[in-house]
Amino acid sequence: MKPSSCSDRRTHAFALLALMLLLANMMMGCRSQSEEVGLNGSDPRAVRIAEQVVTALGGWEAYRAMRYLSFHFVVERDSQVTADWGHDWDRDTGDYRLEGKDDKGEELLVFFNVKTKQGQGFKGGRLVGGEEQQALLEGAYGRFINDTYWLLMPYKLRDPGVTLRFEGEEMVGRQTYEVIRLTFAPNFGLRPNDIYRAFVDPATRRIHRWEYMAESGAPPRPAWWNQWKDFNGVKLATERRFEGRNVRFLFTHIVVARDVPPGLFSPPKGVAMR
């Protein structure tokens, strides 16, 4: 067997170097492609804006330290209060208490767990059962999903199943906003076809406005996010004013705490079911 020459060795070295460069370029290309897509198909700029929003509102540490959240979700139409739902939530255990009135004005009180969706419901002071109880529990869970999302949406931009897209800058009035679009994975939540566009102030990194669409192609329903306040390190907007309509959603009696009031999630005893 003839020994290899210096020329052969150099040729082999150059071939090996070329192969290594090719593999490196392929790896860089794959990395760039994955970075472009991001978590759940989100694009990197939209994810960065979402993180900046959370930081501006107090940061993840303050939000995660919030074990107990209490608030009232108030609907005001033509300056008249048409609904007022009291919410209490132990975010560690999932225990929940909802209190308000139905369309007929009857008092409702529901104790349930958002993880198991099991609990007890009271209507007009009486404990209900069977189908009536199931309807109360389903309605209470729906209120939990809807009302907490209206309040906490900036902190839920990075939830699993949420895809964020940066849609560029958009001027509304005299203000320029950075717009990110939210879509949801199939079977995510109660309304996976919902679409939101969040308008972020580049200076404050707060959401000042959003547009809601029931599905792709549906007309947007814009609402302004006003009256930002600090609650134990967690900043929340306490008013949603609908554009072009005399309707407001107000968040009142807000409590953000690390401790849960004792006995708050214990249903009353001695109430007969009929």
Image: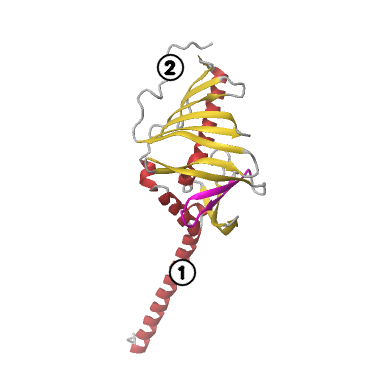
* Residue type highlighted by circle 2: Pro
Where residue 255 sits in the image (x, y, percent)? 41, 34
Mark 1 = which residue?
A: 26
* Residue type highlighted by circle 1: Met
Assign a secondary structure to mark 2: loop
Where residue 181 sits in the image (x, y, percent)? 56, 52
Label 1 packing within 10 angstroms: few (<14), some (14-19), many (20+): few
Assign a secondary structure to mark 1: helix
Looking at the image, is mark 2 or mark 1 nearer the viewer?
A: 2
> For residue 209: magenta?
yes
| Quarter in which the N terminus is drawn | bottom left
How many numbered discs sit on the rendered protein? 2
Residue 82 visible at all: yes
Q: Residue furthest front?
A: 79
Mark 2 = which residue?
A: 268
Residue occupying the point 43% across, 11% down? 270
Q: Magenta part of the protein: which range?
A: 195-214
Label 2 packing within 10 angstroms: few (<14), some (14-19), many (20+): few
- Determine the image quadrant of residue 253: top left
Residue 157: image tag: none
Q: Does the CB distance between marks 2 and 1 fall below 8 Å?
A: no
| Quarter in which the C terminus is drawn | top right
Where residue 266 sits in the image (x, y, percent)? 40, 21
Where residue 49 sits in the image (x, y, percent)? 47, 55
User: How far apart in space, not on screen, are marks 2 and 1 (Cα)?
Assistant: 65 Å
